[in-house]
Amino acid sequence: MTNMTEFEKIDKEMRVMGERLSLTHLLVTSMELIETLPEDQRDQAWHAIMMLIEGAKSSGVPIAEG
C-alpha cells in the first residue's frame, strides 16, 4: 500500500467534508419543506427523513451531527 501525500490526504478530507455538507444541506432543505406540508402529512414525511438519516449512518455515510 502506498502512502498518501499530504495533498492527497487534504483532498480526501475535503471530499468527505463536501459530501457531508451536501447531504446535510439536502436534509435541512427537506426538513424545511416538510413544514410546508399539510399537517396530516408531516408525521409521515418526518418518519421518512429519520429513516434516511439512520440508513445513511448505518451505511457509513458521513452526516453532520447536531
Image (cartoon, rainbow, N blue to C red):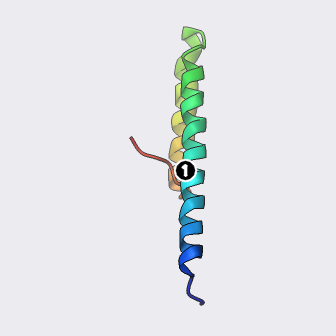
Residue 31, x across and y down, in percent: 54, 27
* Front residue of 57 and 65: 65
* Front residue of 63 and 17: 17
Residue at x 50%, y 48% (from the top left corner): 63
Q: Which residue is mark 1?
A: 20
Residue at x 58%, y 32% (from the top left corner): 48
Q: Is residue 66 above or below residue 5?
A: above
Instruction: State the quadrant of the C terminus.
Output: top left
* Front residue of 33 and 8: 8
* Amino acid type of the residue tagged 1 in the rendering: Arg
Q: Tag 1: Cα neighbours inside 10 Å, few (<14), some, or many (≥20)?
A: some
Specify the farthest residue to the bottom.
Answer: 1
Which image quarter: residue 23? top right
Instruction: State the quadrant of the N terminus.
Output: bottom right
Residue 4, x across and y down, in percent: 57, 82
Task: Label 1, secondary structure: give it.
Answer: helix
Residue 13, x across and y down, in percent: 53, 64
